[in-house]
Amino acid sequence: MFISDFDYNIGYTIKTNNTTQQQYVYVFMANLKPDEFGLIVPQKK
């Protein structure tokens, strides 16, 4: 599933813990536009 609110993109899925059988949200992608907050993202080498 993807959320695209406020021009931020979040990819997530709901998973179940095998031991406790509790569900949780697993975020696999987050594009929060760090440059808008004055943050610098290091370049991949």
Image (cartoon, rainbow, N blue to C red):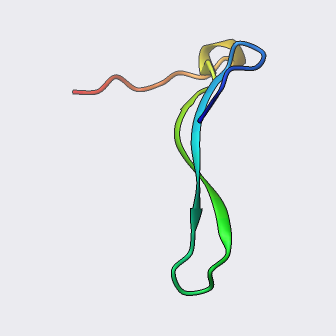
Q: Quadrant of residue 36?
A: top right
| Residue 30: x %, y % from top left | 56, 32
Please report the residue visible at 71 percent of the width from the left and 19 percent of the height from the top: 37
Q: Quadrant of residue 8?
A: top right
Query: Between residues 13 and 6, which one lies in front from this camera angle?
Result: 13
Please report the residue visible at 61 percent of the width from the left and 21 percent of the height from the top: 34
Query: Between residues 16 and 33, which one lies in front from this camera angle?
Result: 16
Looking at the figure, which quarter contains the N terminus? top right
Query: Between residues 1 and 44, which one lies in front from this camera angle?
Result: 1
| Residue 32: x %, y % from top left | 63, 24
Please report the residue visible at 29 percent of the width from the left and 27 percent of the height from the top: 44
- Please tell me how many numbered marks the rendered image carries: 0
Most extreme residue toward the left, as rendered? 45
Looking at the figure, which quarter contains the C terminus? top left
For residue 34, side relative to residue 29 (left or right): right
For residue 45, side relative to residue 22 (left or right): left
Most extreme residue toward the right, as rendered? 6
Is residue 19 shown above or below 38?
below
| Residue 3: x %, y % from top left | 67, 27
For residue 12, side relative to residue 23 (left or right): left
Query: Between residues 44 and 13, which one lies in front from this camera angle?
Result: 13
| Residue 16: x %, y % from top left | 58, 69
Please report the residue visible at 54 percent of the width from the left and 87 percent of the height from the top: 19
Is residue 7 shown above or below 13?
above
